[in-house]
Amino acid sequence: MDIKSFLYPKNEVSYLMTSSNMKEAMDKLEASHYTAIPILDENGLYFGTLSEGDLLWKLKATPGLGFDMMHEIPVVSIKKRTKVECVAISADLDDMLALAADQNFVPVVDADRVFLGIIRRKDIIEYYTRNIAD
C-alpha cells in the first residue's frame, strides 16, 4: 500500500489560489463544506492551508472588517494559526499517517512541490476499519 492509493486528486478538490481574497475563501469553504482549504500559487505549487478559524480570527483582529469588505483582504495576508504539512507522493506511508493523525487532510505534492491532491483522514480511517474487520 502506498500514498497514491489514498489520493483524492486535485481535480476533485476545492482549493484557493494565492490571488484569492477572503470573500472567495468564505464562498469556497461554504460551497465545499470544508473546514480548511489548500492554497496554491500561480504555478500550482502548494502554498499553505486556510481554515475557518483563520478567517474568524482575522475578522476578530480587524476592527471594522465586515462581510462587505472581505473582497479587499488577500488570503495570503491572513495569518495561519496552524501549519498544515504536505507530504511527497513518493514518501513512506508512515510519514503520511503521522501527519494525518494531526490534520483532517494531508496535501500531497510531487518532487517539485506541485499540488497533486489530498489524502483525507476519513478515507484512511475507513480503509483501516474495513481491513481490520476482515
Image (cartoon, helix red, strand yellow):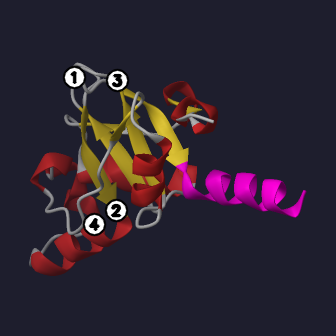
Q: Nearer the viewer, residue 117 or 77?
A: 117
| Secondary structure of residue under mark 1 | loop
Residue underneath mark 2:
51
Q: Earlier in the sequence, mark 3 or mark 4?
A: 4
The amino acid at mark 3 is Asp
The chief SS type of the magenta part is helix
Name the N-terminal-most of marks 1 and 4: 1
Asked if residue 28 can be seen in this view, the reply is: no
Q: Are the residues flagged by discs 2 and 3 in contact, CB closer than 8 Å?
A: no
Disc 2 from disc 3: Cα separation: 23 Å
Residue for badge 1? 42
Q: Amino acid at mark 2?
A: Ser
Identified by mark 4, the residue type is Leu
Numbered mark located on residue 55 in the image: 4
Magenta highlight on residue 125: yes
What distance separates the C-alpha of mark 1 from that of mark 3? 16 Å
* Horizontal and vertical percent position of residue 68: 26, 61
Q: CA distance from mark 1 to mark 4?
A: 22 Å
Nearer to us of marks 2 and 3 is 3
Residue 58's label in the rendered image is none
- The residue mark sitting in front, 3 or 4, is 3
Marked residue nearer the N-terminal end (2 or 3): 2
Q: Position of residue 64 (x, y in %)?
A: 12, 75
